[in-house]
Structures are given as structure tokens and as C-alpha cells.
Image: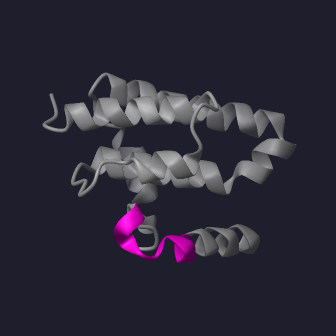
């Protein structure tokens, strides 16, 4: 079992609250554990970013929304069990690590980050 099990369970609850509409993605991101070293938790954070970035697509495409909701739920369920995410999921997000580090209120670049998300979405 992982040394990060408590953080994984906490993040699982955050993701499920986002999935159920009880918490905004922004709120979940701001409450994410600090100084995360667990690759599973880092990948889950980036899945959350992509979930937010694709909000307009989900609004227009019901099938896409359903698939993305199921994906977020899968990640949440995996974390709730304390398990590692599959390596292919972790690998899919690695390219984004340097562009979108885990944020907290005191980082001072939160506004720039949201601007980055909007620019990247328009570039798609």
C-alpha cells in the first residue's frame, strides 16, 4: 500500500465532489494537498485541470460529458482504495507537469494559470 494513502483518499473525496457538482474544480485545486510527490496524485491533479478545460465541450457533447465524468469517477474510485493509477494515465499527463504546477492561494500566479488554461483551450 502507498505511503500516500491518506492524501489519495482525501483527493478521491475532492474529485467525487467535483463530479457530483458539490465543489468547483477551482475549489478542489485550491484544497489539493501541498508538496505532492506521489505521481498518482500529480496525474489526478492534471486530470482535474483537463476536466475544467473541457467544460465547454462537455456542455455541447453529452457522450463526451459522460465519458469524462466516468473517467473522473474511475480516478476517484482508484484513489479511494489507495491504489496507484495505471501507468498509462500517469504517463499521459507528464508532459503537462511543468506548464501547470499544483497551485495554492499563496503561489501568486493563480491568475496567470487560469489565463493559460483559456489560451490553451482556444488553441485546440
Q: Magenta includes 19?
A: no
Please tell me in which quadrant of the rendered image residue 6 appears. top left
Judge left or right: residue 67 versus residue 45. Answer: right
**In which quadrant is the C terminus drawn?**
bottom right
Q: Position of residue 90 (x, y in %)?
A: 37, 49
The residue under the point 57% across, 37% down is 23
3 shown above or below 28: above
Task: Using the rendered image of the protein, determine whether residue 103 is visible from the camera's viewpoint.
Answer: no
Q: Camera-side residue: 39 or 6? A: 6
Q: How many marks?
A: 0
Q: Camera-side residue: 122 or 93? A: 122
Judge left or right: residue 113 versus residue 36. Answer: right
94 shown above or below 45: below
Q: Magenta includes 109?
A: yes
Residue that lies at the very extreme toward the right in this rendered image: 60
Please tell me in which quadrant of the rendered image residue 123 appears. bottom right
**In which quadrant is the N terminus drawn?**
top left
Q: Position of residue 64 (x, y in %)?
A: 74, 39
Q: Camera-side residue: 42 or 14? A: 14
The residue under the point 13% across, 37% down is 3
The residue under the point 63% across, 74% down is 115
Judge left or right: residue 50 versus residue 108. Answer: right
The residue under the point 68% across, 75% down is 119
Q: What's drawn in magenta, residue-wise?
A: 105-113
Secondary structure mostly seen in the magenta stretch: helix
Q: Position of residue 122 (x, y in %)?
A: 75, 71
Q: Position of residue 80 (x, y in %)?
A: 35, 24
Amino acid at each position: 500500500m502507498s505511503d500516500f494513502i491518506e492524501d489519495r483518499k482525501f483527493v478521491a473525496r475532492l474529485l467525487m465532489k467535483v463530479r457530483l457538482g458539490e465543489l468547483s474544480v477551482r475549489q478542489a485545486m485550491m484544497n489539493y494537498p501541498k508538496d505532492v510527490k506521489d505521481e498518482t496524485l500529480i496525474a489526478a491533479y492534471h486530470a482535474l485541470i483537463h476536466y475544467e478545460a473541457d467544460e465547454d465541450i462537455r456542455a455541447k457533447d453529452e457522450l463526451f460529458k459522460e465519458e469524462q465524468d466516468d473517467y473522473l469517477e474511475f480516478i476517484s474510485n482508484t484513489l479511494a482504495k489507495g491504489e496507484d493509477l495505471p501507468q498509462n494515465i500517469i504517463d499521459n499527463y507528464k508532459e503537462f507537469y511543468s506548464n501547470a504546477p499544483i497551485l495554492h492561494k499563496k503561489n501568486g500566479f493563480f491568475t496567470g494559470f487560469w489565463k493559460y488554461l483559456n489560451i490553451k483551450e482556444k488553441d485546440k
